[in-house]
Image (spheres, grey):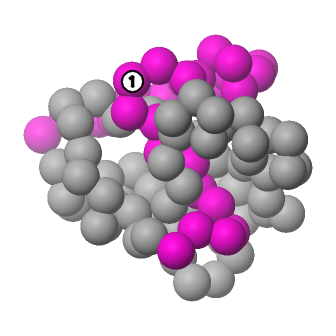
Amino acid sequence: LYLPGLKVQNSLQNCLEGLVLFGDLEATVHITKQPLESTVTLVIGPESGFTPQERQLLLDHGAKSVLLHKNTLRAETAAVVGAALINSIS
């Protein structure tokens, strides 16, 4: 057993290395259907979702849009849900 690492970043540019998944209200692929690598970065945005520019930046850098839940989650809840789902499939 292990605890996932948590890093709070002040910009999206600092999060774009390796396999990057981001919670997206427009995603069609559930996070549990995403093949994972040994290290995964999960980017959580505000409850209203990422701006179109932020979303495009993530996609342009190869980040994968994933659905965490069918409902909109609070930001702090999305982080916990995302970590639990990644842990359950890795």
Name the quadrant containing residue 38. Answer: top left
In what element is the residue under mark 1?
loop
**Residue furthest bottom in the image:** 70
Mark 1, Cα crowd under 10 Å, few <14 / some 14-19 / many 20+, is some
- Which residue bears the numbered disc 1? 18
In the image, residue 28 sits, relative to residue 41, either above or below, namely below
Give 25 or 1, whichever is nearer the viewer: 25
- Residue 84: give x, y in percent of width and height: 35, 58
Q: What stretch is highlighted in magenta?
A: 1-28
Q: In this view, does 65 lie to the left or right of 38?
A: right
Q: How many marks?
A: 1
Q: In this view, does 57 lie to the left or right of 51?
A: left
Which residue is at a point 79% across and 59% down the rendered structure image? 49
- Residue 31: give x, y in percent of width and height: 39, 63
In the image, residue 66 sits, relative to residue 90, either above or below, namely below
**Residue furthest front in the image:** 60
Residue 32 appearing in the image: yes
Q: Is residue 28 left or right of residue 77?
A: left
Which residue is at a point 29% across and 35% down the rendered structure image? 3
Q: Does the magenta stretch include residue 22?
A: yes
Residue 79 appearing in the image: no
Name the quadrant containing residue 25. Answer: bottom right
- Residue 34: give x, y in percent of width and height: 31, 58
Give 33 or 89, whichever is nearer the viewer: 33
